[in-house]
Amino acid sequence: MECNETRLYGATQLTIGYDAEFWNLSQAAAWVVLRDRSTVNKFGGHSPESWRAFMMYDSMWVCKPVGELTDLHDALLKGRLTAIGHADQAGTNMGAIPPIEWETLILTPPSAYRRLSNNAKDVPWHNIRVASADMKKLWRARSEVASRSRYDWDAIKAIFQDIQERCPDFSQNELISETQQEFQDRFNKEPPVRSTIQAKIKSWA
């Protein structure tokens, strides 16, 4: 069932389904991981499902994952995607969350927290939202991806190996993130998702 219900959010009336101007972090995660409209709607209602519980049971998925939650975190950390939220003071206005914040924030849709030295959880930002238009631009729908020409994997391999040579201390995740960014900058095209590149790396060894 489509969920295009509207509600008042502050002074602005927003749609809360797939067509909403802003998505919560669970909706953003659903789009990155599954790229499915109905799943985005599932997490936009008044009583949305738990993202963690949803991901524990693959019988609940309508399609196989094509991305990972870390892809969303990487985009926020690198400033490719900007989130907004309420700071941890009552009555504050919505503001942009600086990318540097995501260096210590742990993404747990629909929220994010950081672990303090005493092992307590600190939630510095509330009601976190991202623009759905930005999400759809960064992560294309399955139908759009399927209609595109195949990736130039020789070029991607060359980029990956060049970064690997220049940055020998990088972890594989860091190498993949840098490869994705350089690919997008060079070809002005959405890069393959992390899991796809990881699968290819195994064949390069």
Image (cartoon, rainbow, N blue to C red):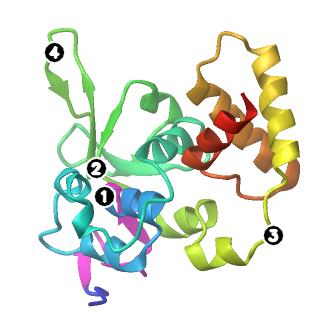
Query: Which residue is label 4 attached to?
Result: 119
Q: State which mark lies toward you, 1 or 3.
A: 3
Badge 2: residue crowd in 10 Å (few <14, some 14–19, many ≥20) = some
The count of marks equals 4
Q: Is residue 108 left or right of residue 31?
A: left
Q: Which labelled disc corresponds to residue 109?
A: 2
Give x and y (percent) for residue 165: 81, 16
> Dot 1: what SS?
helix
Disc marking residue 149 = 3
Q: CA distance from mark 2 to mark 3?
A: 33 Å
The image position of residue 70, as x and y in percent, is 46, 41
**Mark found first going from the N terminus, 2 or 4:** 2
Residue 161 sits above or below residue 151 on the image: above
Q: Quadrant of residue 166?
A: top right
Mark 4 residue type: Asn
Image point 79% across, 64% down: which residue? Answer: 150
Picture coordinates of residue 11, whole percent (x, y)? 30, 72
Instruction: Identify the element where label 2 is drawn.
Output: loop
Mark 2–mark 4 Cα distance, whole angstroms, equals: 20 Å
Q: Secondary structure at mark 4?
A: loop
In the rendered structure, are the residues bearing label 1 and label 2 in contact, judged by CB atoms less than 8 Å apart?
Answer: yes
- The residue depicted at 24 percent of the width and 77 percent of the height is 8
In the rendered structure, which disc, 4 or 3, sits on the residue that comes first in sequence? Answer: 4
Q: Earlier in the sequence, mark 1 or mark 3?
A: 1
Tell whether position 11 is magenta.
Answer: yes
Q: Is residue 113 above or below residue 53?
A: above
- Please provide the residue range marked out in magenta: 6-25
Q: Nearer the viewer, residue 88 or 40?
A: 40
Q: CA distance from mark 4 to mark 3?
A: 48 Å
Q: Is residue 160 magenta?
A: no
Residue at which label 1 appears: 26
